[in-house]
Every structure is written in structure tokens, then in C-alpha cells.
Image (spheres, grey):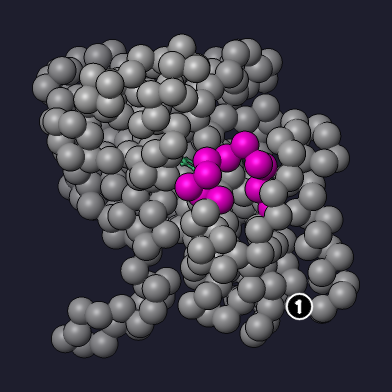
Amino acid sequence: MTALYHGTTWQEDLAEAIGNTPLIRLRRASEATGCTILGKAEFMNPGGSVKDRAALAIIRDAEERGTLKAGGTIVEGTAGNTGIGLTLVGNARGYRCVIVMPETQSQEKIDTLRMIGADLRLVPAKPFRDPENYVHVSRRLAEQMAIDTGNAIWANQFDNLANREGHRITTGPEIWDQTGGQVDAFTCACGTGGTLAGVSLALKERKPDVRIVLADPHGSGLHGWVKSNDLTVEGSSITEGIGQSRVPENLKDAAIDDAERIPDAEALTWIYEVLIHEGLSVGTSSGINIAAAVRVARTLGPGHTVVTILCDGGSRYQSKLFNPEFLRGKGLPVPDWLG
Ligand code: PMP
């Protein structure tokens, strides 16, 4: 997998700089619970998010299968981060990326995708059952481009199991090694489910009684799915890239013990807390993940170790999470240093 030569510490290309992220103790969350709460700093990946891993795993898999050939095109529907990962790895390997994204996603992600050379197609936000939903638009576009050029693939992050496998063989074992196997619980939100499912399988294989807890925002059906096999969606959330009204293939075989539904205000409290007191700038899904880790730590009691994922960075949501006007408009608390 790596092309590190004996005695050197450099990476062959950008792809090899993906993963092996630090695991950072979240001091305030740990002190509040008497547990050790650790955040895997996925915002330190080259593309700035956990989705670099899925992008790389999907591209590698397509290369190995021979479906993606030199000079080919990768088409994907994404909330943004997967598109950023695919485009950067694509740039490094000579593939062009066509990215279909709902126009409701943050301006920062839109600007980043344009900046890095993605062929970006913004579409109106529609539910999955609507044929104009971004996932279906991207699939049709990929099918057409495959006919026209003979060298285009649909990355299909939701149902392509290369995504989960990437996390099963990298993120999960990294967490195991970094904690020396001292991990009692893992909390994580779901977009495709690749992270949660892959890490859950890797940890359960090594420690069957590790507790795996889905962290879910309002406006997602997954909390109900875990609790009572009911995917009914209620409420809404400002979070991006997480929450689902269906169960993607990548999530189906996840080993999940329980779920926590986290309100936006609770997630934001932790985002501001880790930023101002610990210097960690993280995005919305990380806030949901930390809040769930705190709840799980309180349930387990002092002395346990809970790991979660810091999926991406706060600057990706500057115009929302750190914008008093936006926060007030949503009825959310404005942190005092932002006025
Ligand atoms: N957090 C953020 C910021 C994301 O963009 C995503 C993916 N869209 C996730 C979490 C969820 O990761 P996964 O797709 O592995 O469930």
C-alpha cells in the first residue's frame, strides 16, 4: 500500500498522506465525565475531512478492478467532503472529477470544490425518493459519460462497500493501536455509514464487547432505525453530510449497540467548547459526535475510554456556525466572543 523506502519518511504522493491521523484527548469532555474521551483528528487529512479515506478507498478499488483507467472521469454525488477528497486524489492520479452537490451545502465547500478544479454541478436539494435527488442525478450522469467516453465511473459512496472496507482496514485498526486496545466505546454519526460500519467491524473483531453508538442529528431516521427499526424522520438540523432517511449498503452490516439523537444546540456547545478551550476547530458532525461521546461516557461511568471522530474542520462552516446572523435566524445560541 505504501511506497516508503527503507530509512525515509516521505510519502510517494498525496494519497499516502491520507490517514494515520492523531488521536487527541478532549480535555473538557474527559473532565466533565471522569472518562478519557478521545477524538480522531480526521480534519488533518489532506482534503480536510474523514472522507479522504473513502475517496481513496473507492479510487483504489476501481483501479484494481480495472473499471477506472488512466485519464478517466469520476462522477459522484456528495455533500462536499467526498467530492473534495475525490478531486484531490483524482488530481494527483490524473482523473477528472464531476461533482454533483445539493446547493444547500456550505459556501465554503462550494468554493473549495471550484478552487481545486472539480467540475461542479449544483442541484436543488430533493429527498432521496425524488429522481432529481443529487445521488440519482450523479448516477445518471456517470452512466451517460461512461457511454460517451468509455472511461467514467460512478463512485457511489453510499452503496459501494469499498468505502466501509477502507475504514475497516485503516481507521478502525488505527484507533485500536492508538488506544493500545483500551477502548470501551465508539460514537459516530452517519452519512454513508462507511466510517461507523468500518470502525465498528474492526473494533468488534478485536473486542466483542466494545460499545458502538450511532450519533444522529434531528431530521434523520437512523436513530429510530437503531432503536425500533423505524426510519421515520422528524425535525431538522443545520448539520451537513450526516443523517439519512434510508439505510445505505455501507451501513447495513454495522455492529451498532445503541443510538443517541443530539440537538444542534448541544452539538454547538461542544464545538465552541473544544475550539476556545482546546484549540480544536471542528465542524457540525464532530459536534454531534462529541456530544454523543459525552452522553455515552456518562452512561458507562468514570474510568472508561470513549473514542469519537472529528470529521472535518470548523472553517468549512465559517459562514454558518460562526455567523451570529445565521445562528440567530435558526434560534441557536451565539457564543459571546462572536457578539
Ligand atoms: N461528517 C462530515 C462532515 C461528512 O461530510 C460526512 C460524510 N458526508 C460524515 C461525517 C459521515 O461520514 P460517513 O459517510 O462515513 O458516514
Residue 184, relative to residue 193: is it above or below?
above
Magenta-highlighted residues: 100-110
Note whether residue 190 is visible: yes
In this rendering, would 166 be left or right of 309? right
Which quadrant is the C terminus positioned in?
A: top left
In this image, 293 relative to 25: left or right? Answer: right
Residue nearest the viewer, comparing 309 with 100? 100
Relative placement, left or right, of 213 versus 83 is left
Q: Is residue 96 above or below residue 208?
A: below
Instruction: State the residue in front, 53 or 317.
Output: 317
Identity of the residue drawn at 58% across and 18% down: 236
Task: Please tell me which residue is depicted at 88% across the width and 72% down the height of the picture.
Answer: 147
Residue 165 visible? The answer is no
Residue appearing at x 44%, y 37% in the figure:
319
Residue assigned mark 1: 151
Q: Which quadrant, please, contains the N terminus?
A: bottom left
Q: Is residue 105 magenta?
A: yes
| Residue 243 sits above or below residue 314 on the image | above
Please name the amino acid that badge 1 sits on. Asn
Q: Where is residue 54 drawn, in percent x and y? A: 51, 56
Residue 20 pos. (x, y %): 29, 59
Please say whether residue 68 is one of the residues in the magenta stretch: no
